Amino acid sequence: SETYPDLKRDSRFAQLTEEHVAYFRQLLGSESAVIDGVTRSDAADDIEPFNTDWMRKYRGHCRLVLKPGSTEEVSQILKYCNDNMLAVVPQGGNTGLVGGSVPVFDEIVINMGRMNKILEFDEVSGTLVAEAGCILEVADQFLASKGYIFPLDLGAKGSCQIGGNVSTNAGGLRLLRYGSLHGNVLGIEAVLADGTVVDDLCKLRKNNTGYDLKQLFIGAEGTIGIITKVSILCPQRSPAQNVAFFGLESFEQVQRAFREAKGQLSEILSAFELMDESSQALVRQVTGNKRPLEGEYPFYCLIETSGSNADHDSEKLQAFLEDVMEKGIVADGTLAQDETQIRSLWAWREGIPEALSHLGGTYKYDVSIPLRELYQLVEDTRARVEAAGLIGDTDEFPVRAVVGYGHMGDANLHLNVSTRRFDERVEKVLEPFVYEWIAERQGSISAEHGLGLMKKKFIGYSRNPTMVGLMKNIKTTFDPNGILNPYKYL
Ligand code: FAD
Ligand code: MLT
Ligand code: ZN
């Protein structure tokens, strides 16, 4: 409660006892499947990583971590928790950015890391079936060996899990090309709060038999069930990839470049990412790497193409670069010549969250805004923080930078305010200002990261009371005792 003065532990939930722990030990058998801080006084260090989120912004007080090895074990755990009023937090790779994956008080963490097997792959249809705890990059590497690609890619791929991705409905770097998980996930197996196993592990592309219930689990953030298995349609991996990196003088020009890219690169365009100068200066500060372009520009874009013919694609991208430079849309640009250069150009985009995390506390706003006004939010926020006199790099003036980057192709901006440390004065200047700004433009306060604990108070800026009411009804139907991820957005 010291950490979250606005929240109170729900007294309906039981306190953990030695008897509870003994039950879980006997159920899960293996020593490493139970991290027990209830009966062991020296377990605090082992539990700490499960209590703290990736941004080191949210910290819970959990004393028990369970790592089930099968759907049956998840079912038994939840049934027992439901019968005994023990609250739980489902946890994947714990890379979520809204405080949803860690406990608030003493909820039990159910970490899915042991359920990490690839179960099935159909080389004709491209359908992959895997356990929820399978790491995204592991799944993608497996698919690469078969000539396929996972239809989602993001900077945390080395630690996030498919179940966590689906529960967040993560968007990532290639949504522009492959679409959202709502379209790609074909089936789900999940366990409800009372231990009921929902077997909807369908592998069909088309299935219009009644409500498509699996869609409710996609993006539910662990509030209505624990996903245990996923079946997903994976596209063929393109043999040729090319990447270009541009500098541009204005956001107006960024929009023109995007239109031209869609028109000229059409079916081979696979990513169109935006970075502003402040974000790139931070990456440079942290990594010390040489910038891709000679000069500095207010905006940069990373464009990726994926196609079947390397020469044809790179000719197309080269011609595109020449054209947009000739038209004065792009001020300078470079094309990657090989795999190493592709990776190093991507690092200037994918490395932004990591660079920010090295510098102190970051206030993150992941929003959808009509494209025309996308960057205006960064400018208005910067002006507001400046007017509040918070810019500097000292304890008194803690805001180091207001930066903008994101998935331009999806009209998804990441507004980040980088501070020396988390500071209530900064938060008050930013919230609810950012959410009001977005609501005025009918944007979304959560484009791809979810609501978690961070946006609990703000759901009303993007969803009307009727919709929130329906969500609450669904939550009650699936989890009548409210044991699944309590205190979060519902
Ligand atoms: P966790 O963080 O462990 O959990 C996320 C939520 O899902 C929590 O509410 C948790 O309770 C729930 N959950 C987890 N597993 C299950 C399960 N099996 N069943 C039910 N509920 C479950 N997101 C994007 O959308 N696009 C990006 O480009 C992107 N890039 C990122 C880059 C970095 C460097 C980082 C750190 C994060 C990024 N994210 C991005 C945020 C995040 O959404 C993803 O990292 C990922 O989708 C979370 O997966 P995870 O396994 O870590 O889930
Ligand atoms: C990204 O696009 O890099 C991720 O969503 C993470 C972030 O917003 O920082
Ligand atoms: Zn993102």
Image (cartoon, rainbow, N blue to C red):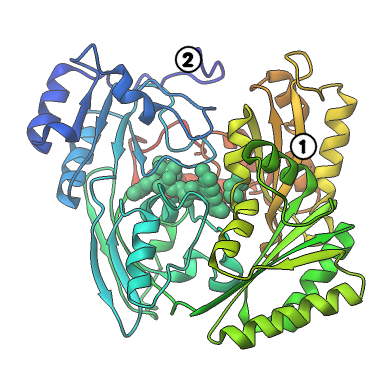
Q: Which one is nearer the viewer's eye here, 93 or 189?
A: 93
Tell whether 98 sits left or right of 186.
Answer: right
User: Circle 1 sits on which residue?
Assistant: 402
Q: Which one is nearer the viewer's eye here, 439 or 62?
A: 62
Label 2–label 1 contact, CB within 8 A: no
Tell whether 372 sits left or right of 97.
Answer: right
Q: Is residue 282 above or below residue 231?
A: above
Residue at image location 50% in from the left, 60% down from the top: 153
Give the image quarter of residue 26: top left
Q: Amino acid at mark 1?
A: Val
State the SS at label 2: loop
Tell whether 277 sits left or right of 179.
Answer: right
Q: Nearer the viewer, mark 2 or mark 1?
A: 1
Tell me the crowding category of disc 1: few under 14, some 14 to 19, or many 20 or more residues within 10 angstroms, Cα based: many
**Residue 348 placed where, x, y %?**
65, 52
Q: Is residue 334 above or below residue 464?
A: below
Tell whether 191 sits left or right of 224.
Answer: left
Q: Is residue 266 above or below residue 186?
A: below
User: Circle 2 sits on which residue?
Assistant: 1
Q: Amino acid at mark 2?
A: Ser
Which sits earlier in the primary sequence, circle 2 or circle 1? 2
Tell me the crowding category of disc 2: few under 14, some 14 to 19, or many 20 or more residues within 10 angstroms, Cα based: few
Residue at image location 47% in from the left, 68% down from the top: 151
